[in-house]
Structure formats: structure tokens, C-alpha cells
Amino acid sequence: MKNLRIFFQILLMLFLIPCLIYAEKTHLETCYKEDKNNKKNGEPVPLGNFSLPTSQQPGPLVSFGQNILDKGQAQIFLFADAFIGKNSYLTDIFPSVLYGITDDLYFFFSVPFSPGNKDRDNHSSGLEDIFAQLEYTFYLKNSSHSVDQATIVANVTFPSGSVSKIPPTGFGSNSFFIGATFNHMEINWFFFTSPGAILTTSKHGTKFGNQFLYEFALGRNISSPPGWIFAWMVELDGLYSWKNKFHGISDPNSGGNIIYITPSIWISSKRLILQFGPGYPIIQHLFGNQSKKFLSFDFNLGITF
């Protein structure tokens, strides 16, 4: 009941804040005169969230997608997370590269591995499932004070991890992801939402449950020195998982629904991206007997070329 009350309080907050965004937007329109070139090209004025190129503007920490950059541009990332629970923990490190194939199509490749996992008396570590991803911008609308952008995201994972380890470090077979994102960014405020699904495949009677992701975030630019963007962000990331099957038999101690709230800080310059924050599960309904998670820590470092 307490977690449900917190969840509804967050929904109320997310309902009220857009009113503040609209009021501030009206104020900005009266305070800033459009630059002639910006007006002609329909580009936002270079202030706040738009003071740096698209690749350096605030984006998600733990939500998927929105890996946007210009044609021929490249970025390397080092993302790390840790999920801590009672008698359990999971850790991941994701070295990744992002490349702009065109101004609208982007390629992302990651080779994740785990330094160490624990579930009660069991321990594991090692290479996880690598994946290759494409993201395409199919909608883009610019004005002097805002940008609306929508993308479609698809990836495939390869079974480089291990399903026999406990906890497992992979699905044991290929899996596929399909999702979409929508981002609205203004000079100070921004929000995005992103639904998606992970579709797993079976091998030798083993199949991890399909997963449905539902995500939303809200953030705001804060006072920053010239050449930098500082921002705060709050993400709500939901994950519903169906039950796993081993040897064709459904595992009653798998699957469920969990929603994390993750506040984070964004810092970027023309070449550097730094983002970090903790996460807390406000809703955690797990099927059967599973170790619950108490807290997560997330960190991302990016360099643009």
C-alpha cells in the first residue's frame, strides 16, 4: 500500500509539472527574440538544452534508445550498473560504440559483461549477451524553442553469455527487441516516453520469458557554465516479465512486474558526457519465491569524436 501511494504521488507530480513547463515556455517566448538564421532554418535558439549539438543534449540513463548523432559522428560509452538486494546482487558493465550512418539512422554495438553476480549461495560472472542495434528517426519537428522527435529501435542479441551459470549471464539463445521513443525538448524542460518489448527464443527446451518495457522521464536544464549542459532527470522504468521455461516446464519462481524510479544528473560538454544516479523499486511484484532488489546504482561515461 505504501509503494502504491508513492507511485500515485509521483503520477500527480508528473501531471502538475507540465503546467509549469507551459508557463515557462510562454515566458521564454516573450523573453528571447528569434535569431534570423534560426527562424529561417526552423532551428531552436542555442540556449539551455540546445546550447550544444544534438549528440550532447540530455538523454536517458537507464531507458533505451535516443542514441542520436550526426552522420559520420561516433561515440564510445562505458555504462555500468549494480542491483543490490537481500542476499543477492547483479552487476553489469557495457562497453559500447555508437555511429551515425546517416543523420536519421544510427548503429549501436555493445559487448556487456558482469564482474560478479550473487543469488543466495550462488555466484557467477563473465561475458553476457552482446547485441547490435539500429535506431531510426521517423519524425522530427523543430521550432525556435522546442524539438519533437520520434524514433523506432530494433536490436538482436547473440548468445555469448551463459544460461547454465547461476545467476545466468545470458538467455542461451538469440533474442530480439523492438521499441519506439518520443522526446519533447525545450530550452529548459524535456520529457520522453519509450515502450518496447524483448522477444526471446528457445533452445533445448529453455526459454526465458518475454519482457515488456514501459518508460517515462522528465528533466530540466540547470545553471551551467558556457560550453556545458547540466541537467537533472527523473526516470520511471517499468518491466513486466513472463515466466521462464526450463526443459519445457514453466518456472513458478520467475517473472513479475517491477517499476524503478531513477533520479540522475547529466553533465556534458562538446566531447564529454557524464551521467549517474541511484534507482529504487517503487513497485515490485515478483512471482513465486524470488530475491527482491532494494537499490540500483547507474553510471554512464561517453566520449564524442
Image: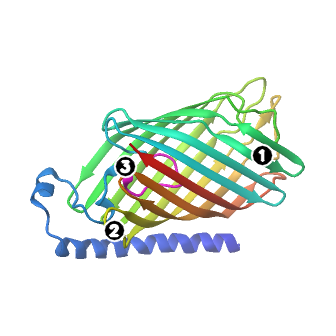
Which is nearer the N-term, disc 2 or disc 1? Answer: 2
Number of callouts: 3
Q: Residue at x 90, y 49 (%)?
A: 121
Query: Which of label 3 and label 1 is nearer to you?
Result: 3
Which residue lies most toward the right here? 121
In the rendered image, the residue lying farthest to the top is 204
Marks 2 and 3, the one that precedes in the sequence = 3
Q: Nearer the viewer, residue 289 or 130?
A: 130
Q: Are marks 2 and 1 in contact (CB under 8 Å)?
A: no
Q: Which span is picked out in magenta? A: 55-65
Which residue is under mark 2?
Answer: 188
Q: Which mark is residue 8?
A: none
* Residue depicted at 24% across the width and 76% down the height: 27
Q: Is residue 185 magenta?
A: no
Left or right, residue 192 beside residue 261: left
Q: Secondary structure at mark 1?
A: loop
Q: Categorize mark 1 by other alpha carbons within 10 Å: few (<14), some (14-19), many (20+).
A: some
Task: Choose top left, top right, bottom left or bottom right for residue 228.
Answer: bottom left
Lateral position of residue 285 relative to residue 112, left or right: right
Say which of marks 2 and 1 sits in front. Answer: 2
Place of residue 295 in the rendered image (x, y in percent of width and height, measured from the top left) = 69, 63
Quadrant that contains the N terminus: bottom right
Q: Which residue is mark 3?
A: 55
Q: In what element is the residue under mark 2? A: loop
Q: Would you name the residue on which mark 1 appears?
A: 254
Q: Are marks 3 and 1 in contact (CB under 8 Å)?
A: no
The CA distance from mark 2 to mark 3 is 17 Å
